[in-house]
Image (cartoon, rainbow, N blue to C red):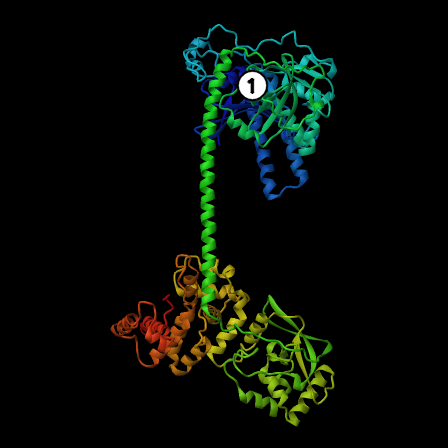
C-alpha cells in the first residue's frame, strides 16, 4: 500500500484543504473513501482518504500540525503494542499503561470532526470491545470510523475552470455526452442548481409509527443512531436518493423496519455484527442499484446485500435489509438499470420471505393500473450511461471468471485422471511383479493347551515404535512345532545349523536361553505351537538328554519358581494377536544376529523394515533432487532406521532391494544372492551386491516414475542378478553384442504371424532367458569397470 500525509497550515484551513482533495479525486473519476477515525482506546484521531493509484491501494492522511506531532508520539506506543501481539513480552498491565499514555496524548489534539463543515457523515462503523453502539458517546473504548461525503453545496472551483467536470458522465455539468439510452447531445444549463431539493412539505410522518424525530431529517447515520437509542418512533425523510426521492426510517416491529432488521440479523450474526450491519445502512442504501419493483415494494441490491423498501404514495420506507448470496449475480445482470419512477410490475415475490404483515403501512392501497412513467432527468440519464458501462465491465469480468473457473476445472479433471491412471499403472505393476521374499501363505492351526505364568512378562521389538509384549507359558513338549524347512510356515532362514541343535540337546547350559532378553531368550511360539523365533532352540529342547533336561528344569525353578513336569516346556507367546504379515516379518527379523548368509540377511532386513517401505514414507524423501546413488542410500537409511543417529546403509538397501526385485516361479532372490556369495570371490561378490542393493532406490524411483507407466523392473531384477553372477563366474565381462543380436533375431524370426513360436513351445522360458542374457550384458561391464562404485546404473 502507498501511504502519504498532508499537514494543513492550521486547523482553520483543514476543511478547505480536504475539500480540494475530494474535488480533485472526484473530477478525476477516482473512486475514494474519506474516513474520520476516532480510536477511543488509544486516543488517536485522523482523517484517512483511501483510493487506488495504478491499481495499487493508496492512503493519504490529513492532519493539523499539532495532531501530526501527537500522532508520531502515539505511533511509538502503537508499534510496541502491535509487536507484543506476536512476541507476548509485555504484561497486561504494561500494555494498559501504554494505551493510557497514548490516550492522554490524544486529549491534547486540536483535530475535531466539527471542523469539517463541507462534509456530511453518511455512516458510522463501530468496532472494539463495546457491545452497545446506539450512540457515538455510549462506548468509551470503541473505535469509530465516520464515512464522510462532500456536501453538494460545498465550495468548488468555478465550472469554467475545471474541464474535467464536463467529462464525468454523472456530472450535471456534462454538456456533450452521447448516452447509450438515446442519441444526440444533451444540453445542461450551467446555472442549474445541483443541491438536492429540500424535503417536500407534502410528506408527513405516519402516526402509526409513533413520534417523528424531525431534527434528524436528511441525516441518515444520525437517524439510525437515534432510533437505536430510542427503540421507537420514526424519522421521515432520513435518506435521499435522486432516483427514488426521500426514504423514511421507522423503528417498526418484529416484522418491519429497524426493529425487524435488528432482530433478524442478531439471530444470524449476533448482536455486535447486527449493529455494525445496521450502522452501514446509509452507505448500503446509497450504493445499492435498483433491482425491481413488486407491487408495493422496491428491491435494491449491492454485490452482497439487499434492501427492500415499502411504498406509500410518493414516499418510500425501509422495510428490511439483509445479506443475500444472489445479490452479486443480480448486481451483474443490471445491464439497463431502472429507476424507481419508470419501472412496471414484475409479479414476483420479494427475495426474503414476507407475509402480509410485512407491509410497512396499513393505509397502503394496491393499484391495478400500470404506473405512469415520468421523463428521466439529465442526472438520471447520465447515471444510466455510467451504470451501463459499469455493467459491461462487470459482465466482462464475470465471463473471464467463468472461463478461469472452467480452465481450473479442466486442469483439476486432468490431474484427477492422471492420478487415477498412475494408480492403475502402479497396481498393474504390482500384480505382475511377483512375490516378495516374505510373501507367504501362513496357515495357523488349532490352539494347543497353554498355562500362563502369572507375574512374569517379556517383550521383543523391531524399533522404538514396534514393541511386542510376550507372556510366559507352560506347554507340552510334543505340542511344539519347530520348523527347519526354508520357506515353509514361519521359517524364513535359507540355511540351518544342526550343530546348534545338538549343542542344546546334549550340552545345555542355562545361559543359552535364560536372561538373554529379546529374540535370544526362550523360544516364541504361536497359539498352535508353531515357532516364530528360536526354531533351533525349540528343536534342541525336544531332544534334551537327561543331563540337559535336568539343567533346564533346575534353571526354570531357579528363575521362575516353577517345577515343570518331565513332558513340559516353559516358552513365550505374544500377549496380543498379530496379523500374518506381522508374524512373518517378526520371524524374519528375529534372525538378525544369527546370520551366516547374505540371503538370510536380506530376509531379516526385509522383515525389520517392510512396514516402513511405503510410497508415503519414501516418495517425498527419495524423489527430491539427488547427486548420486550414495546420496539416495543415505536418505533411505535415515527413513527406515529411525532409531539410529548414524544408520548403516547395508540393511535398509537390502530391504528395499527385496521389495523391488521380486521372485519368479524359477528363482528366489535370497537363493540367488546365496549362490553368488558361494561362487564368486569376496571382492567380486561385494561389487555385485552393492551394485544391486545400493541402486535399489534408483530402481524404486524408476518403477514409480509416472513418465514410464509401462516400465516394470520387478520381475527382471532377480534373473538379472543371477545371470550377472553366472557371467562373472564364467569370466565373461559382457556377452558379445553380435551374438546377443543373433540370438534375438533368431527368436523373433521364428515367431509365426499368428504369434506362436516353436522355440517358446519347446522352452516356455525362452523370452526370460533372452532377457537374462541381455541384462548380464548391461551389468557385467559395470561390475568390471566401476569396481563397486556406487553411482546409479
Q: Residue furthest left?
A: 738
In which quadrant of the rendered image does the C terminus lie? bottom left
Name the outermost residue toward the front: 754
Q: Residue at x 71, y 29 (%)?
A: 263
* Residue occupying image coordinates x 39% and y 57%: 707
Q: Is residue 634 left or right of residue 369?
A: left
Image coords of residue 106 (percent x, y): 62, 26
Q: Quadrant of residue 311?
A: top right
Left or right: residue 474 compared with residue 385:
right
Q: Residue 750: image x %, image y %? A: 29, 72
Viewer-proximal residue, 162 or 301? Answer: 301
Does residue 97 sit above or below 472 in this rendering?
above
- Which residue occupies 52% across, 75% down? 604
Front-lying residue, 247 or 103: 247
Q: Secondary structure at mark 1?
A: strand
Q: Position of residue 337 (x, y in %)?
A: 51, 20
Question: Would you say residue 137 is visible in this rendering?
Answer: no
576 sits left or right of 495 in the view: right
Locate residue 225: give its quadrant: top right
Q: Is residue 12 above or below residue 781?
A: above
| Above or below 277: residue 495 | below
Badge 1: how crowded within 10 Å, few (<14), some, or many (20+)? Answer: some
Q: Quadrant of residue 138?
A: top right
Q: Which residue is mark 1?
A: 149
Amino acid at each position: 500500500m502507498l501511504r502519504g500525509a498532508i499537514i494543513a497550515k492550521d486547523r482553520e484551513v483543514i476543511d478547505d484543504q480536504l475539500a480540494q482533495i475530494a474535488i480533485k479525486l472526484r473530477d478525476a473519476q477516482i473512486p475514494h473513501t474519506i474516513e474520520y477515525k476516532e480510536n477511543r482506546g488509544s486516543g488517536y484521531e485522523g482523517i484517512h482518504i483511501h483510493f487506488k493509484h495504478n491499481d495499487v491501494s493508496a492512503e493519504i492522511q490529513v492532519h493539523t500540525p499539532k495532531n501530526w506531532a501527537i500522532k508520531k508520539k502515539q505511533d511509538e506506543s502503537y508499534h510496541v503494542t502491535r509487536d507484543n501481539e506476536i512476541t507476548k513480552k509485555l504484561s497486561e498491565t504494561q500494555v494498559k499503561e501504554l494505551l493510557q499514555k497514548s490516550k492522554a496524548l490524544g486529549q491534547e489534539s486540536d483535530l475535531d470532526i466539527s471542523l469539517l463543515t463541507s462534509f456530511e457523515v453518511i455512516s458510522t462503523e463501530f468496532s472494539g470491545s463495546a457491545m452497545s453502539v446506539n450512540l457515538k458517546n455510549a462506548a468509551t473504548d470503541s473505535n469509530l470510523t465516520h464515512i464522510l461525503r462532500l456536501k453538494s453545496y460545498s465550495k468548488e472551483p468555478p465550472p469554467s475552470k475545471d474541464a474535467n467536470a464536463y467529462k464525468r458522465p454523472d456530472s450535471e455539468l456534462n454538456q456533450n455526452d452521447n448516452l447509450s439510452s438515446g442519441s444526440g447531445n444533451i444540453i445542461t444549463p450551467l446555472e442549474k442548481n445541483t443541491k438536492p431539493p429540500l424535503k417536500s412539505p407534502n410528506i408527513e410522518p405516519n402516526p402509526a409509527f409513533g413520534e417523528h424525530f424531525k431534527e434528524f431529517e436528511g441525516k441518515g447515520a444520525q437517524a439510525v443512531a437515534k432510533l437505536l437509542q430510542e427503540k421507537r418512533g420514526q424519522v421521515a425523510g432520513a435518506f435521499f436518493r435522486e432516483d427514488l426521492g426521500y426514504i423514511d426510517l421507522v423503528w417498526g416491529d418484529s416484522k418491519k423496519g429497524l426493529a425487524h432488521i435488528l432482530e433478524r440479523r442478531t439471530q444470524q450474526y449476533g448482536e455486535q455484527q447486527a449493529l455494525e450491519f445496521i450502522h452501514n445502512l446509509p452507505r448500503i442504501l446509497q450504493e445499492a442499484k435498483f433491482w425491481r419493483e413488486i407491487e408495493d415494494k422496491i428491491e435494491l441490491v449491492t454485490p452482497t446485500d439487499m434492501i427492500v423498501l415499502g411504498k406509500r404514495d410518493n414516499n418510500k420506507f425501509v422495510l428490511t435489509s439483509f445479506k443475500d448470496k444472489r445479490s452479486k449475480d443480480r448486481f451483474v445482470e443490471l445491464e439497463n438499470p431502472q429507476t424507481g419512477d419508470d419501472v412496471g410490475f414484475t409479479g414476483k415475490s420479494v427475495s426474503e420471505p414476507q407475509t402480509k404483515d410485512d407491509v410497512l403501512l396499513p393505509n397502503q392501497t394496491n393499484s391495478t393500473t400500470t404506473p405512469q412513467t415520468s421523463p428521466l432527468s439529465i442526472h438520471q440519464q447520465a447515471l444510466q450511461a455510467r451504470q451501463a458501462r459499469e455493467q459491461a465491465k462487470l459482465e466482462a469480468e464475470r465471463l473471464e471468471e467463468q472461463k478461469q473457473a472452467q480452465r481450473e476445472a479442466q486442469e483439476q479433471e486432468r490431474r484427477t485422471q492422471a492420478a487415477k491412471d498412475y494408480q492403475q499403472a502402479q497396481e498393474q505393476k504390482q500384480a505382475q511383479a511377483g512375490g516378495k521374499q516374505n510373501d507367504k501363505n501362513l496357515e495357523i492351526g488349532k490352539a494347543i493347551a497353554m498355562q500362563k505364568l502369572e507375574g512374569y512378562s517379556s517383550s521383543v521389538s523391531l524399533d522404538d515404535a514396534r514393541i511386542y509384549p510376550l507372556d510366559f507359558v507352560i506347554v507340552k513338549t510334543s505340542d511344539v512345532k519347530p520348523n527347519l524347512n526354508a520357506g515353509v510356515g514361519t521359517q524364513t532362514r535359507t540355511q540351518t545349523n544342526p550343530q546348534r541343535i545338538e549343542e542344546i540337546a546334549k550340552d545345555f547350559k542355562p545361559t543359552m536361553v535364560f536372561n538373554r532378553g529379546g529374540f535370544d531368550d526362550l523360544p516364541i511360539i504361536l497359539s498352535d505351537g508353531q515357532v516364530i523365533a528360536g526354531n533351533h532352540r525349540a528343536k534342541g529342547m525336544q531332544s534334551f538328554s537327561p543331563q540337559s533336561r535336568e539343567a533346564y528344569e533346575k534353571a526354570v525353578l531357579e528363575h521362575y519358581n516353577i517345577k515343570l513336569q518331565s513332558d513340559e516346556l516353559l516358552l513365550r507367546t505374544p500377549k496380543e494377536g498379530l496379523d500374518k504379515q506381522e508374524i512373518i516379518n517378526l520371524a524374519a527379523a528375529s534372525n538378525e544376529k544369527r546370520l551366516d548368509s547374505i540371503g538370510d540377511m536380506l530376509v531379516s532386513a526385509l522383515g525389520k523394515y517392510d512396514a516402513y517401505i511405503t510410497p508415503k514414507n519414501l516418495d517425498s524423501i527419495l524423489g527430491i533432487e539427488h547427486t548420486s546413488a550414495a546420496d539416495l542410500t543415505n536418505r533411505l537409511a535415515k527413513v527406515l532406521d529411525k532409531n539410529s543417529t548414524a544408520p548403516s546403509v547395508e540393511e535398509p538397501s537390502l530391504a528395499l532391494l527385496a521389495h523391488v526385485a521380486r521372485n519368479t516361479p524359477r528363482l528366489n532372490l535370497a537363493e540367488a544372492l546365496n549362490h553368488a556369495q558361494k561362487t564368486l570371490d569376496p571382492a567380486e561378490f561385494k561389487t555385485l551386491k552393492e551394485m544391486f542393493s545400493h541402486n535399489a532406490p534408483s530402481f524404486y524411483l524408476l518403477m514409480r516414475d509416472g513418465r514410464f507407466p509401462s516400465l516394470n523392473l520387478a520381475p527382471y531384477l532377480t534373473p538379472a542378478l543371477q545371470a550377472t553372477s553366472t557371467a562373472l563366474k564364467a569370466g565373461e565381462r559382457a556377452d558379445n553384442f553380435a551374438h546377443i543380436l543373433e540370438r534375438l533375431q533368431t527368436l523373433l524370426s521364428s515367431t509365426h504371424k499368428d504369434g506362436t513360436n516353436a522355440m517358446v513351445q519347446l522352452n516356455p522360458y525362452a523370452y526370460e532367458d533372452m532377457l537374462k542374457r541381455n541384462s548380464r550384458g548391461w551389468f557385467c561391464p559395470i561390475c568390471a569397470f566401476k569396481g563397486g562404485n556406487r553411482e546409479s546404473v
